[in-house]
Image (cartoon, grey):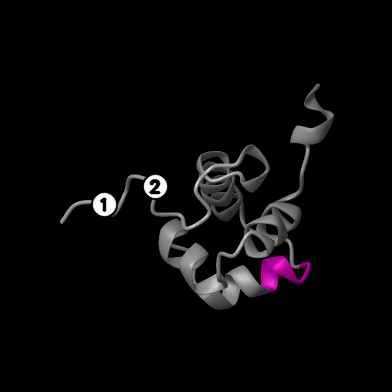
């Protein structure tokens, strides 16, 4: 059902952080400044472009799905 998919951006950030990602890592992966990540996590209403960036990142790293929690699944594996 879609009921579980209606998480707010704040809830998505909290889940990612609880899964072990730092605000700094989320900021780097989403290209959102870390202080903005912190403000969104603490309840500030985000800009639409930040909502889209966090939604995209969360979809690829949803900790509820048992996906990689380090955020490095494919983007930085080149050596």
Q: Are marks 1 and 2 in contact (CB under 8 Å)?
A: yes
Residue picked out by circle 1: 77
The residue located at (70%, 56%) in the rendering is 15
Residue picked out by circle 2: 73
Q: Position of residue 57 (x, y in %)?
A: 51, 47
Q: Which mark is residue 7?
A: none
- Judging from the image, what secondary structure is the residue with disc 1 in? loop
Front residue of 19/12: it is 19
Principal secondary structure, stretch drawn in magenta: helix
- Judging from the image, what secondary structure is the residue with disc 2 in? loop
In the image, 20: left or right of 45? left
**How much space separates mark 1 and mark 2, taking CA atoms?**
7 Å
Which contiguous range is marked in magenta? 39-43
The residue located at (63%, 47%) in the rendering is 63
Q: Position of residue 51 (x, y in %)?
A: 61, 50
Q: Which of the 4 quarters of the picture holds residue 43?
A: bottom right
In the image, 65: left or right of 78? right
Which residue is most to the left? 79
Above or below — where is 45 with respect to 53? below
Q: Residues within 10 Å of mark 2 (few under 14, many from 20)?
A: few
On-image quarter of the N terminus? top right
In the image, 74: left or right of 34? left
């Amino acid at each position: 059902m879609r009921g579980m998919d209606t998480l707010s951006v704040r809830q998505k950030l909290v889940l990612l952080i609880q899964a072990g990602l730092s605000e700094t890592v989320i900021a780097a992966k989403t290209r959102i400044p870390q202080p903005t990540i912190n403000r969104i996590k603490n309840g500030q209403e985000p800009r639409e472009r930040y909502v889209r960036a966090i939604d995209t990142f969360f979809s690829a790293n949803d900790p509820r799905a048992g996906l990689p929690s380090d955020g490095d699944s494919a983007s930085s594996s080149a050596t």
